[in-house]
Image: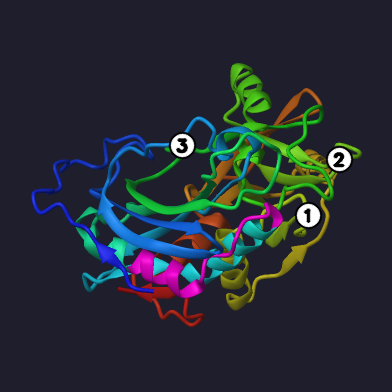
């Protein structure tokens, strides 16, 4: 497929201080678009960033056919730009699309679109160590029809925005035992819009109670830990890295996968299995050293300083020698080209 790149020759980066911009609020100059019509992808192009014109009948506005990915590009120590693990993100995007009855994007189109967009807007990739260019590939059903059906027309887009640390400080969370994020057989393993919309209300209630996020538990018994907010959750208990197994209710996080790989290569012990929140409660009550952290593209690692369970708050370990910081540093150095990329994760522009 050929790419028609429309570039606004007058467009220059107007914002110099990207650090002060709230996450996800400042787009770069350009965006990628491709349309799916008559059973094929067409009209792939990069244009100046602008608002969309859409029919109020567009199916995405009514029946939830919206899927997205979140990934990042980094400035390396030699000045080159690295898109981190685009193939892993493509695999997950494809699984999400299949679950939502949406057409697959050809892998070559996905990778090349990322490459060209990041290359074109590379001036927006922060040079600061804690900065990155956040990339948001997404697809929406664009067919104009009121009727419950899988659409026949779609719009695939990629937009970008400079991003820094998502959580400035270690966070407080509570174990959620009333509301659920997902149930077995549902869309919990899918990055579709509805999963996030349904999580807003219980998260809002938790914030009103003084917490930053919730820890989701299983829909059947409200006992087994699944995710924390919009992140996977991981624990380090007496030096052993423990995290819930993947299932149809949890997202296959790219950051989670990367951290587990790094931990294994470090020779650390991994324990991936179903975990009851009561087990974490008992470990904290017995004064074991327990680290807890969220892992996700936006936050990378979000240290958890306290967990509320059954009406009581428990403090987790967030000392400077915590293993989670060592894993985060290893990931940072791989992305920046400061450490050998043994796993071929870096896609260098």
Q: Quadrant of the image for the C terminus?
A: bottom left
Residue tagged 2 = 223
Vertical position of residue 260 compared to residue 228: above or below: below
- 289 relative position to 343: left or right: right
Element on which disc 2 rests? loop
Residue tagged 3 = 169
Q: Nearer the viewer, residue 27 or 44?
A: 44
Where is residue 24? Give x, y as percent. Answer: 38, 40
Identity of the residue drawn at 15% across and 43% down: 16
Residue tagged 1 = 248
Q: Nearer the viewer, residue 137 or 242?
A: 137
- 133 relative position to 291: left or right: left
Nearest to N terminus: mark 1 or mark 2: 2
Q: Nearer the viewer, mark 1 or mark 3?
A: 1
Query: Is residue 237 visible to the viewer in this orientation of the structure?
Result: no
Q: Quadrant of the image for the N terminus?
A: bottom left
Nearest to N terminus: mark 3 or mark 2: 3
**Splitting the image into 4 quarters, where does residue 183 fall?**
top right
For the residues labelled 1 and 3, the Cα–Cα distance comes to 31 Å
Q: Tag 3: Cα neighbours inside 10 Å, few (<14), some, or many (≥20)? A: few
Where is residue 42? Give x, y as percent. Answer: 42, 63
**Outermost residue, left side:** 10
Vertical position of residue 24 compared to residue 129: above or below: above
Q: Which residues are magenta?
A: 99-115
């Amino acid at each position: 497929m050929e790419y028609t790149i429309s570039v606004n020759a007058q467009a220059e980066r107007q914002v110099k201080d990207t650090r002060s911009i709230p996450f996800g609020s400042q787009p770069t100059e350009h965006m990628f678009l491709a349309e799916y019509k008559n059973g094929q992808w067409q009209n792939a192009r990069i244009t100046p960033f602008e608002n969309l014109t859409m029919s109020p009948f567009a199916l995405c506005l009514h029946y939830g056919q919206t899927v997205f990915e979140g990934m990042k590009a980094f400035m390396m120590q030699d000045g080159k730009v690295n898109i981190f693990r685009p193939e892993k993100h493509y695999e997950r995007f494809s699984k999400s699309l299949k679950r939502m009855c949406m057409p697959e994007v050809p892998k070559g189109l996905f990778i090349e679109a990322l490459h060209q967009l990041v290359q074109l807007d590379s001036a927006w990739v922060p040079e600061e160590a804690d900065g990155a260019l956040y990339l948001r590939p997404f697809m929406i059903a664009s067919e104009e029809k009121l009727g419950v059906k899988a659409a026949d027309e779609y719009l695939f887009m990629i937009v970008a925005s400079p991003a820094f640390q998502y959580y400035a400080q270690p966070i407080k969370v509570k174990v959620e035992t009333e509301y659920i994020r997902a149930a077995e057989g549902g869309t919990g393993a899918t990055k579709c819009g509805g999963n996030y919309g349904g999580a807003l209300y219980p998260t809002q209630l938790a914030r009103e109670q003084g917490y930053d996020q919730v820890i989701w538990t299983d829909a059947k018994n409200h006992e087994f830990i699944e995710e924390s907010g919009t992140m996977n959750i991981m624990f380090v208990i007496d030096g052993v890295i423990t995290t819930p197994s993947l299932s149809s209710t949890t997202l296959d996080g790219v950051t989670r996968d990367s951290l587990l790989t790094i931990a294994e290569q470090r020779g650390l012990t991994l324990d991936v299995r179903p975990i009851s929140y009561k087990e974490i409660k008992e470990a904290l009550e017995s004064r074991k050293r327990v680290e807890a952290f969220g892992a996700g593209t936006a936050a990378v690692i979000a240290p958890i300083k306290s967990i509320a369970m059954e009406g009581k708050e428990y403090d987790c370990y967030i000392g400077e020698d915590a293993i989670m910081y060592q894993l985060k540093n290893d990931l940072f150095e791989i992305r920046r080209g400061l450490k050998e990329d043994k796993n071929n994760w870096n896609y260098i522009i």
